[in-house]
Amino acid sequence: MIYFFDQDIKSKDYSELLNYALNFCDTLTLRIRNYTKSLDGKKHLWGGEKQFAEWFDKVSDFTQNHFGEFILKIDYDAQYGAEKNGHENKIYTIAFNSESLKKLLVVNSLFGWNSGHTPEDLHLYTNGNCWLETISHEKICYIHDDSEELKALLREMNIKFWDGEDDED
């Protein structure tokens, strides 16, 4: 596994990484945290409930309109990747292909999927197995791939990563 943090992959490099992943990834997921639906029954809102409900609807509408034909399913769960929180997540599973890749490029960086006006935390999958996992607001990325080809690509992008070896590349 490859791990890096606090180094965003942007613009041309972001496009290049997605095109590399297109060689073997077939689906992606994005999530929207529903701050109005707490799983423990407590209120966890930092602002008004109406404000968060409007934001949730706005981001849901964007996702539905932007990825519409590529959406394979929508799930609701507190678990998303390695992260479990106290809120329900609306999780979009989306076909990953050359056309949906173009839709991903509306955001210009790997960690650009970070709430605001878009869903967050891009994940890419190969046959149901997670290949790339981001926690965008923390600027953390895990890539479940130890290939030398991927390591070389990340080095070309000047990404310093940890791959389980003693030293950071």
Image: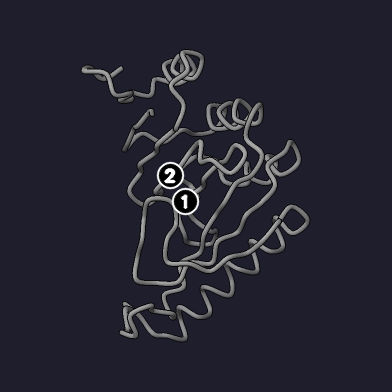
Q: Secondary structure at mark 2?
A: strand
Q: Residues within 10 Å of mark 1 (few under 14, many from 20)?
A: many
Pick out the residue farthest to the left: 166
- Residue 64 position (above or below residue 2): below
- Residue 154 position (above or below residue 40): above
- Label ID, residue 95: none
The location of residue 75, given as percent across then percent down, is 58, 65
Q: Quadrant of the N terminus?
A: top left
- Label ID, residue 134: 2
Is residue 5 found left or right of 62 in the rendered image?
left
Three-letter code for the amino acid on which mark 2 is drawn: Thr
In this view, the residue in front, 45 or 2, is 2
Q: Secondary structure at mark 1?
A: strand
Identified at 66% across, 39% down, the residue is 26
In this view, the residue in front, 117 or 2, is 2
Identified at 31% across, 38% down, the residue is 6
Three-letter code for the amino acid on which mark 1 is drawn: Asp
Q: Earlier in the sequence, mark 1 or mark 2?
A: 1
Is residue 50 found left or right of 108 in the rendered image?
left
Residue behind mark 1: 121
Q: Quadrant of the C terminus?
A: top left
Q: Quadrant of residue 101?
A: top right
Identified at 53% across, 27% down, the residue is 13
Query: Label 2 near label 1: C-beta < 8 Å?
Result: yes
The location of residue 148, given as percent across then percent down, is 46, 13
The location of residue 81, given as percent across then percent down, is 43, 51
The location of residue 150, given as percent across then percent down, is 49, 20
In this view, the residue in front, 54 or 40, is 40
Identified at 54% across, 67% down, the residue is 90
Q: Residues within 10 Å of mark 2 (few under 14, many from 20)?
A: many
Q: CA distance from mark 1 to mark 2?
A: 5 Å
